[in-house]
Amino acid sequence: MFPVFLLEDDDIQRQHYKTFIDNGIMINDAPMVLKKAVATTEELFTDDLPEQGLFFLDMEINDNKTAGLEAATKIRHQVPLAQIVFITTHDELSIVTLERRIAPLDYILKDKGFEDIKKRINNDIQLVQVNIEKYTHYSQNLFGYKIGERYFSIIMDDVIMLMTEKNAPGKITLIAKNQRAEFIGSLNGLEKQYNNLFRCDRSFLVNLENIRSFDSSKKELTFIDGSTCKVSFRKTKELTEKLKKL
Amino acid sequence: MVYIDWNLSWANNFAMLFLILQLTHYFLKEFKPYKILTDIFISLIFAYIGLFIDDIFILMFVGFILAIQLALAKDHKLKLKPAISLVMAANLQLILSSLATYIARILLFISSGQWKLRTLERYQNVFIGLTIIVTVMLVLIFIISLGPFRERITQTRLQIEHYHLGKRIFMIVLSVFISLIVIMTISDFQEVTATIQAALIIIFTILICFTYWQVTFFIKTFALQTEAKEKMERNEQLNNYLTLVQKQYTELRKFKHDFQNIMLSLDQVLKDNDSKQLKYYYDSLLHEEDDLNNVKSGSITQIQSIDNDAIRGLVIQKFFSAKAKDINLHFELDQKHYSIKPNISIVRILGVLLDNAIEHVQESDDKNITCAFFKTGNTLEITIDNKVNEKININQIFDCGYSTKKDHTGFGLTNVQDLVNHSQDLFLDSKIIHNHLMMTLIVLGSE
């Protein structure tokens, strides 16, 4: 069962949210269970966290305005794939900073009343349920990279290709479904680290799962987002064999 | 004078011209395979001309290429970046070649044990070969020793572009080049001995180094002066505005506080009273409170925590130009103090990203842009966020010339990518999430 967690210091509110979550799971017939509903961050971390989970967190806990954020940072660190939802009042939000730091699934605003909160909690449960079903037959691996002191990770299924460009020596460009990033590294090292990626040319390392087509006369791969890359003559045979297996 | 067989001096001339072109490509960071062929062809022709007219052929060569550049330019205006690179490469090559000639000469004298010019003539095969090898080695040594300064040179180049100093720099470099040629030609013409020519060239080299040093110094001073002037004007405007805003927000907060207190007391009164009219007014007042909560906390005043005048100035300028278009540029800063090293690239990149966001939001319903500064240790992230309606392919917007607007050229992002590529401390991360486009510039090494 996919575990759900709730952190809220106000007893009455917590009771309400608990009911909303239980009802949401029941209505959607979701394979989930509310594992913990706690009032302090300490209680949240008493046991080891599971590999996956949906977390509803209140931002302000006992007058600490960033307690929820600190908890989320810790969760993200221990459970990179965690789905985090903040329940918060409008004043406490720095949405873009939160997005960069935590990348939460959703923000639920308290000022709009219990009815709205109920609806949003139900929506989030549905969203996670769809994700669980979609990803069971995919690999849930992560691709990770580092810039300065920041670690970033992205779901492997979203990775389209990694490439080097002549005018940016030492840097690798990552192209993903909804993202484009760059970091310092070498394709040789990444090729060894991630066996599922295929080196189709000296300057391209690609995710074969996301290929749309291969034009063998032009020696060109097309990906689901429309981007293309060249395949070196040497690698063509290996590629066609790999594509047959897919 | 030493008389050298014509095909040997042809080879020598060719090596010199070819290296000038390669140095130019190196300065411009553009190596293209097909260019090598045209390079060889032009160099061969001018090297042959050089057999008849001594060192002036280099002047002709440089003049010829400048003329071609001028002819190819769209508006018949000389593009300064390639022009300066070419003349600088020629200057360098002249000095390095003369140096190589003397080194080869000394090496030959030592190995043969005869300190006579006759030796050079007798072993001219070896002499010219040696000269070419030494020249190539000197060029390589020069390029390698330049490596660590590359970042600084790029910065200076950006400054030249930023302050439109290109024309002056070009004139300085060109006059140095012409004087160098004149000295060489006259000393050849007057049959000055090699020792005197060597002394002349060494003195001249020192002068050139000094000139280049002076030029960079001049650029720096000019930049500082301009910045100081702009800074004073900006700071004055900013301070006036921020004081005003701060005052307004304090008043607003005071009002909000009073309002909430009154509402709480009213709530109690209402419970003891069942007038419908009173309840109606109370409810409508409650709605007002929602609007009051929507008033942002005056995030522009936080911008004072950015300890970099150029970046702060730019952000404030964009804030005002957005406001003039009814666009709300909102800031998120999670720290009291951000110190960012002066770096023109950051200013230019942020300028383009903010302009793009403003331009995009202007034609959509959601007129909000958020600019967040966010720090982890020494890693600073600056994110510009705005809503996008149509489905945008994130990788397509980086294609040269792509733009969501029909009558727009869309070269902004290409320039951003170019600036980021040139730096080892800057990284660009673009993401589309929840229908928002988030462009993040990551800066390493800020304190």
Image: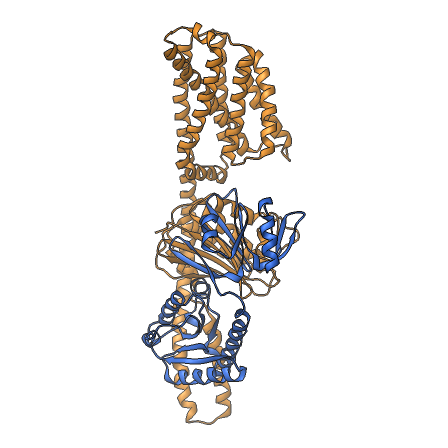
Q: Is residue B180 left or right of residue B34?
A: left
Instruction: In the picture, one chain is orange; tell me its letter.
Output: B
Q: Which residue does the image show at 46% across and 14% down from the upper left?
A: B126
Q: Position of residue A75 (x, y in %)?
A: 39, 69
Could you say which is closer to the camera, residue B130 or residue B179? B130
The way the protein has been coloured in the rendering is by chain
**Can you give x and y, in whole percent of width and height, for residue B122 in the image?**
47, 7
- From where the camera sits, is residue A104 visible? yes
Q: How many marks?
A: 0
Given residues B119 and A56, the one toward you in this image is: B119
Q: Is residue B22 above or below residue B337?
A: above
Eyeballing the image, is B137 above or below A75? above
Q: Residue A90: give x, y in percent of width and height.
A: 44, 72
Q: Is residue A230 visible?
A: no
Q: Quadrant of residue B259?
A: bottom left
Q: Where does the image place residue B427, in percent across and percent down from the top left?
A: 46, 51
Q: Residue at x 51, y 65 (%)?
A: A139
Judge left or right: residue A74 versus residue A230.
left
* Chain appearing in blue on the rendered image: A
Residue A40 vs residue B351: left or right? left
